[in-house]
Amino acid sequence: VKSLEESSLYTHELIQYKGQFEGDYFGDKITLQLEKSGDYTINYKGNEIEGKWFKKDDGSFIEFDSKKQLPFQFMKWSDNTTLMILNLDGTSDDEGGNYLTRIE
């Protein structure tokens, strides 16, 4: 337990549910504009996808309502600057990829 405590990161910083993020999703560039109002815009593979997002569980997960236009449905906050795109089964990418980083 002691080694876990020494290597764990814990922050009291509140998640900001708005901003611009960018990253790669299985090698393709993806950008996200997240609005505090619950709206979002994602640009992926030349498509602009708009919809609503919702907080899930304790707020560390967000769900996207895209009417099946996105290849994923959930993201999880790693910290206030990083979102991890989850696979359809709710797991993360085994290769450690598919992250979006806050740019604004």
Image (cartoon, helix red, strand yellow):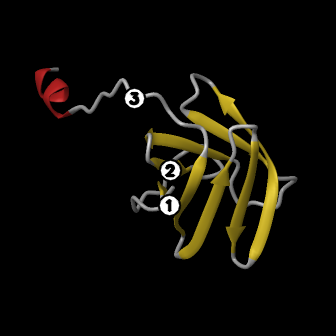
Give the image location of residue 64, x and y in percent. 74, 46
User: As displayed, is residue 7 above or below residue 101?
Assistant: above
Answer whether labels 2 and 1 touch (C-beta < 8 Å). yes
In-image side of 19 versus 8 (left or right): right
The kind of residue on which mark 2 rests is: Met
Q: Quadrant of residue 44?
A: bottom right
Q: Which residue is mark 1?
A: 98
In-image side of 95 versus 29 (left or right): left
Q: Mark 3 or mark 1, which has the lower sequence index?
A: 3
Q: Residue at x 49, y 40 (%)?
A: 77
Identify the residue at the far right of this view: 67
Badge 1 density bin: few <14, some 14–19, many ≥20, Cα 10 Å: many
Q: Mark 2 or mark 1, which has the lower sequence index?
A: 2
Q: Report the disc number at residue 26.
A: none
Q: Residue at x 82, y 61 (%)?
A: 69
Give the image location of residue 23, x and y in percent. 50, 65
Q: Which residue is mark 2?
A: 84
Q: Residue at x 64, y 38 (%)?
A: 62
Q: Which residue is mark 3?
A: 13
> Which dot, 2 or 3, sits closer to the camera?
3
How many numbered marks have been drawn onto this rendered protein structure? Answer: 3
Q: Quadrant of residue 30?
A: bottom right
The kind of residue on which mark 1 rests is: Asn
Q: CA distance from mark 2 to mark 3?
A: 18 Å
Badge 2 density bin: few <14, some 14–19, many ≥20, Cα 10 Å: many
The kind of residue on which mark 3 rests is: Glu
Circle 3: element type: loop
User: As displayed, is residue 72 above or below residue 37?
Assistant: below
Of 17 and 23, which appears nearest the observer? 17
User: As displayed, is residue 13 above or below residue 98?
Assistant: above
